[in-house]
Structures are given as structure tokens and as C-alpha cells.
Amino acid sequence: MNVDRLIFLGVILLTVCRWFLAASLELTAEEALYWVESKRPAPFYVDHGPVIAGVVQMGVWALGDSLLGIRYLNPLLILLATWLLFLLARSVSHQVAARWSVVVFQLCPVVNVAAVFMIDVALALCLVLFAGWCLWCGLHRVHRWHGYWWAGGVALGLAMTLSLPLAGTLGGVALALSLTSRWRDQWGRPGIWLLLVLAVVIPGGLVFYSGHGGLALRAQLNGLGFRPGQLMQGLGQWIFWTGPLLALGLAWLGLRPRRLRRDHGAIFLLLLGLVPLVTGFVWSGLAAPWPYAAWVGTPFLLVVLVGQWMQADVDLERKGRWRRWTLLSTGGLAILGVNTANLAMLGLPWPLALTTPRLEQGWMEASEAVEATLLLAAARQPQGLLVIAEDPQTAALLDFYLSPEALVYRPHEAYPRIHVVESAGLASVYDLWPSYSHALPGSQDPSPFQGLMAIYVTRDSREGELPPNLVHAFKSAEPAAVLDIKRRGRLLHRWRLFHVYQYKGLPR
């Protein structure tokens, strides 16, 4: 059988398996927030544009409020990114290097995790690879206004709306063109300027049109500060989630810089991948945690490494050992990467920094317990209780897993079903919409939540302590229940529920 066809069939089989995983693993906090945002379309949210919310909205419209409705596109995005990587590697290097680039890319832990429940990383990988492919094709076209420049600019602009550190990708394009002698003259042609202008105008226009982009940017930059420990932790996470192959390969290339002097394509992709990666490292040292979307530069580095190793003056036996080691090490880490939650559930020791990004379990049991508590309190307030969560992630997950019949008080569809503790400023996406602390925009009536009873849900270990805003906004409070969420006898997390009585609002 043709090798390319065999690899293609293997990737298709992996894609089908990822769909099954996507329909079985519980929702993550970020996915739940994307689902909440999909119910309320906006040009720009607190930290990203409308692309993710639009993708999730289409899935929910077609498949309903289900796990697959939110994750339906993840495996397809990675499949498309793999095809784009193959085309780019074949153009820059040769067919054999393209095959191995695809194999190693599919075995990377972060790729396997993104193909199941990290829609932001899957979208970023797909969009940036498409922009890189269009840029490469545009460099080899005589037409000054070729469609590749337009398509690449739009793709890069949409990618930059996903995460602020992805701005490093734009710097990578500029640096790659400036330092690669073969394409330095492109600055005198309109194509590259068209691509860069579109990449800036699209996210900038969305931020300006939303009206709160400046507040969102200030909210992200407020907590910046140099943290060397987090910088080293980000480096360790990148090595683990990419696989040790790439880190060792880059060290090998660094010891042999002469190999790259005449390979303009390799130099171009190396710079294109290194700049967003360095941006991610710097960002992880200034803020927490490591920005997962900064992995978008990794595929470009992978193409360079595989292509250079294939051309290296190394005997076939050593290359064969390298291939086996690559399959075992990178593929083994991919299996661990998707199943770290299961390792922790079985009680096996595993470093917290290397757990599957953002994956938690036990939300179905927690939501059922909260719903039972609401039912018990229905006698006091038959119209339902106001539900307040300690943070936006908890609110979004409870909103997804609570049944539509849960006795939650919601006077109008403009209000979210689950609220967060009121705060000053723009701290989360919930601050963009009406909450229990104020009436609907344009309404002269007071808050419809006046005098109502609520349930406050928290995982705070300090028993009996409530946020000051909650204490001042309600007349009194008392503990309602303690929920221990367990799996196979192991405690996942402990919830504390409080009854808070007679909402009166914060003093003005």
C-alpha cells in the first residue's frame, strides 16, 4: 500500500477515535465559558474575539447542548492542520520529510489534547498553519495582489483574536522576511503589506467595535510581573506537551548553525516558529499560566527539524533508532497527556504542572447535588432560587450541567441562569451582561432580585467565610450543605453551599 495513503488512513482513524473521546470526557471550564458566550454573540469578549463562540454556536445549533455539540470541530481542525502541515513540509523540504512531520505532529501530546477539548489551541494551530501556507505560496507568486495574501491575512487576523500572546506570530512573519535574504525584497511589494494590515485590522476592528476592548486589555495587563519560577514551569510544560524530541532537536540544530545557511526555507520557518514560542515563554514569565495558544509556532519548528535530520550525514541505523525513539517517546507522552486525569483518579502520583490542561472531573455529580439542594429549598421560594457561584468557571459549568428543570430563578432571558459574585470593573465575561446586582439596560425598574433568597456555591476551604460583596448585599447567611465529590473512593473536590437571605444590594 502507498505510504501516504497508509498515513492518511491512520490519521482518519485517529480522528474518529477523538470524536468518541470528545463525546465522553466531561466539559472543561474554558469550554463551558465558550458555551455560555455562544448563547450571547458579541464582537469581542474579555480576552478573545467571536471566532470560538461562533464555532460553538454552530455546533450547538446542529447537535444541541451536548459535549459533541461543543467539540464537534476539534478533530476536524486538527485533521485540516495536519493536511496543511503536510503541504508546507513537502514544499519546503521533500515528500519523506512531510510524511514524518505528519507522524510526529499527530503524536504530539498537545495535538491529541487539542483535538478533544482545547478548541482555542485547535483553532489557533489550524489558522496559523493556513496563514503560513498562504504566506509561503504568496512568496512564490509573481502576481502582486494574489489571493494567497488576502487569505493569509484574514487567517492570521482571526488567529490573533484568540489570544493576546499570539501577536508574536505577527512578529515572526516580520522577522522571518527581514532576516531571510531571499525574500527581503518582499517589503517592496504590496502583498506582504496587505497580509500584515489585515492581520492587524481584523482584531483591532473587533476590539474597537466592542467598546470594551481597552478595559479588557487593562484587566489582562494589571497582574503582569516577572516570575522566574513560572518561566521555568512554562518551559517544562512546553517540553512535555510537545515531546522531548523537538527540544533536543532544536539543541542539535543550535550546535550546527552552518546547516541552515543555504536553506532559505528552513531559516524562514525557524524564525516563523521561534518568535511566537519565545513570546509565549516571556508571557509565562510575566503572567500565569503558560499560554497554550503559543504552541502555534511548534509545527513550523517541527518541519525544520525533520527536514534537516533527513538531510543530515548520519548512518541509516542511527536514523532508524531515532524513528523508533520518536514513536515511543512522543506517542507515549500523548497517551499519558490525554489520560492524566485517569492517573490521578487511580491515586497514582503525577506532577500537578503536567496534568492535562484545564481538565477536571465530577461536575455531573456536583450539579445533581446542587439541584437536590434547590429542590429542598423550593418550599421557601417556589419561583426558584438565585444561584451564585464563586467564579465564572464554576458558574458556566453549573449552567451547562444543571438540568433545564432545575429550580433556578431567572426573571428574563437577558440574565444568565447562574450568576457570579458582583465585582467592580471588568473581571470576566459575566461582567459584560446584566446580573442580579442591577436591572436590565434601559429599564427604570429596580433589580427583580430584591428580597430574594439565593444559594452560594464555593470550593473555598475556609469554612464559614463568604466574599465581602456577598455579605454586604444580603441580610444574612447560613451553611446549607457540604458536598464531597468522589470517584472510586478518591475525593476530587469539596463543595460548600450556603443559603443567603433577602438580597438588598450593595450600599451605594
Image: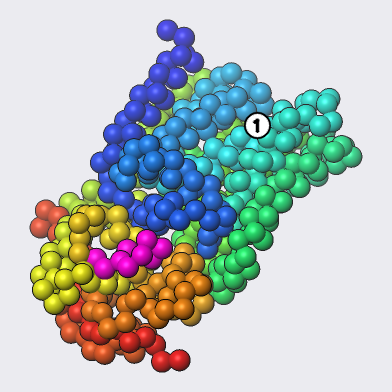
Q: Which residues are magenta?
A: 408-417
Which of the 4 quarters of the picture holds residue 350? bottom left
Q: Is residue 410 magenta?
A: yes
Q: Is residue 260 visible?
A: no
- Residue 465, percent across and down? 26, 85
Which of the 4 quarters of the picture holds residue 143? top right
- Residue 5, percent across and down? 46, 14
Image quarter hosting the N terminus: top left
Which of the 4 quarters of the picture holds residue 184? top right
Q: Nearer the viewer, residue 506 or 234?
A: 506
Name the dominant secondary structure of the magenta segment.
Answer: loop
Toward the top, the furthest residue is 1
Toward the bottom, the furthest residue is 507
Q: Residues within 10 Å of mark 1 (few under 14, many from 20)?
A: many
Q: Nearer the viewer, residue 3 or 133?
A: 133
Q: Is residue 278 above or below residue 477?
A: above
Q: Is residue 119 above or below residue 500?
A: above
Q: Is residue 37 visible?
A: yes
Left or right, 285 with respect to 237, comes to right
Left or right, 264 with respect to 26, comes to right
How many marks the image carries: the answer is 1
Give the residue drawn at x 37%, y 86%: 505
Give the residue drawn at x 34%, y 28%: 16
Q: Looking at the image, what colour scheme do you see?
A: rainbow
- Residue 368, percent across and down? 16, 59
Give the residue drawn at x 47%, y 49%: 53
The three-letter code of the residue at mark 1 reads Trp
- Residue 335, percent across and down? 32, 39
What residue is pinned by disc 1?
A: 133
